[in-house]
Amino acid sequence: MQYLKGMAQEPEFVAEEFLRNFRDVFSVRDMNSFLNSCGIRSSSRETASFLDSHPLVFPLEGGMYITRAGAFTDRLFSIKPTAREVEQGAFVPAGRCLPFVDSEMTGAALSFSVAGHKLPAKIVNLDSDFAIDLYILYGEEYAPQYIAADPANADLDMVRRDFELPATVRLTGIDISYLVEHCGFALGDRLLCRVTDWNSGAISCQVVHESHDRFGTSDAAEQRRNWYVRLEEMLLQSFSRLGPCATMEEQVANVFFEHRNELCTALCGSLDEYFASCMRKVAITSFGVETRLWKKGVQIPAVGEWNRNDLDSMYSHLSISPRNAATLYTFPDFVLDEYILDMLYRRSTDFEALFMRMYAEHCPLNQSQKKKLLLHLNERHGIIASTYNWFADQGEGSVRQDALELYGKVALLVYKIDSAGFPLEKYPQQELIILSQLYSHITRMIEQFADGMFVEEEADTLRLSIEGMRWNYEDIAESLEQAVRRQHISSFKVVK
């Protein structure tokens, strides 16, 4: 990290580089010292908030932290190439290196070496169901996107295919001919791997010969079976303590981090084998519109022991004031700015019409609050309008409009539930989960617009995504509205 010191850099870039490369345990004070050396000032509270919410950081006891790079570099994990892969002379990394590598780095971007010899890439053809299994840790709902993102599928137009994969797909694999010729690799053997450079995705591996033990009768095979049993016990413990994490990858990352000394051994199994044949009490389960790991045969609740004491946990990421929504219902500034851009795109100057679009059914602000918000909107309108180019906004404008229309409906339903003040356990749990996911997804999309991340070539993809979210919203809205009404009715007592 020395190359950053003394250089004028964007704070986000410097912080990200620190987290991608620093491997030792560190404190808020340590990170602030580093940032200061790069000419960046950050308060202890700001830095702590940043670290506590960052996906590349594990919090430790005593106010200490460690990055994913520090937690997983040089830790052992394994991959067992299948017969289909061996037939084509390559294994496909896909999502099989999770949680040890950067989850945002595609399998095609990872590099493998054996005793310093880099293994070349090789394109393989696989049926789509098999390919999805290789990406299962990302969730079956997202696996097609990762498959389509592989450079080998550059000519695959997912929009024209309505986001359905063809029967077979091409994936970037790692050529195993060197392993066969120089390491005696054969079908049934395993690759014992470790990340040597987390930031670049460099992985070193060696062959573990298991092909001779076809029936799994060796001591090593027995120890590996015990490894799967222990992994499942650890997952079940994590469900009780952490609940369903934000993703399946995050769930297993926490488990492997907390138990890395026991799980990251020379006789470790692999997650893809566990999912394929060793799950007993754990299953991949629907969680709203997504999937999570959870107890087999048990529906994941929106509220459990992991968040019961935090009444606002379901909506902690929302901008609507939790449990106080009746006194204040507004939007983050980046959403307000997008509403103003939509107003300019419509070539409108009617702020009352803007209010109607923002609040969908009614404006829950009193006159004083409405006046204050109107002043703020006028001020932002003047700033944004001075540089707005209507002709340049044609591609983004219509997509933004669709996104904001859905955002208004979703946010209003969240407001109704939150301002009612009733326990979240009283609502249909799956519908509540879907609502939270919809709010998170549509807010993230609008935030990407605000950050200038709109790409015109992706407009059709975004429209299809918005349409899918709209269908999901329509499926759950009436059920949740009815639940709100029931709670209000049940709160009244008949006085005789």
Image (cartoon, rainbow, N blue to C red):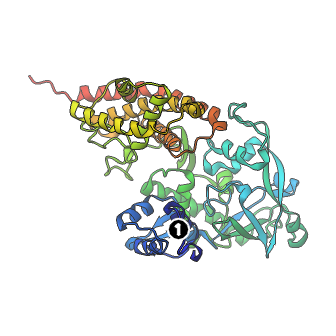
Q: Quadrant of residue 422?
A: top left
- Residue at position x 51%, y 60% from top? 12
- x%, y% of residue 330? 33, 38
Compared with 377, 221 (above or below) is below
Residue found at the very far front of the displayed protein: 386
Residue ID at (38%, 62%): 46
The residue tagged 1 is 8
Q: Residue at x 78, y 62 (%)?
A: 215
Q: Residue furthest left?
A: 496
Is residue 480 visible in the rendered image? The answer is yes
Q: Which secondary structure, mark 1? A: loop
Q: Residue at x 45, y 52 (%)?
A: 243
Looking at the rendering, in which quadrant would you find the C terminus? Answer: top left
Q: Is residue 207 left or right of residue 277?
A: right
Frontmost residue, 332 versus 433: 332
Q: Is residue 394 above or below residue 18?
A: above
Query: Where in the figure is residue 464, as x and y percent of width and height?
Result: 61, 31
Q: Quadrant of residue 476?
A: top left
Q: Is residue 71 above or below residue 352?
A: below
Q: Residues within 10 Å of mark 1 (few under 14, many from 20)?
A: few
Quadrant showing the N terminus: bottom right
Which one is in front, 165 or 258?
165
**Residue 339 at what x, y percent from top left?**
43, 33
In the rendering, at what x and y percent does residue 185 appear?
85, 67
Q: Is residue 259 something one can see in this rendering? A: no
The type of residue carrying mark 1 is Ala
149 or 299, which lies in front?
Answer: 149
- Residue 211 lies in quadrant: bottom right
Residue 183 or 33: which is nearer the viewer? 33
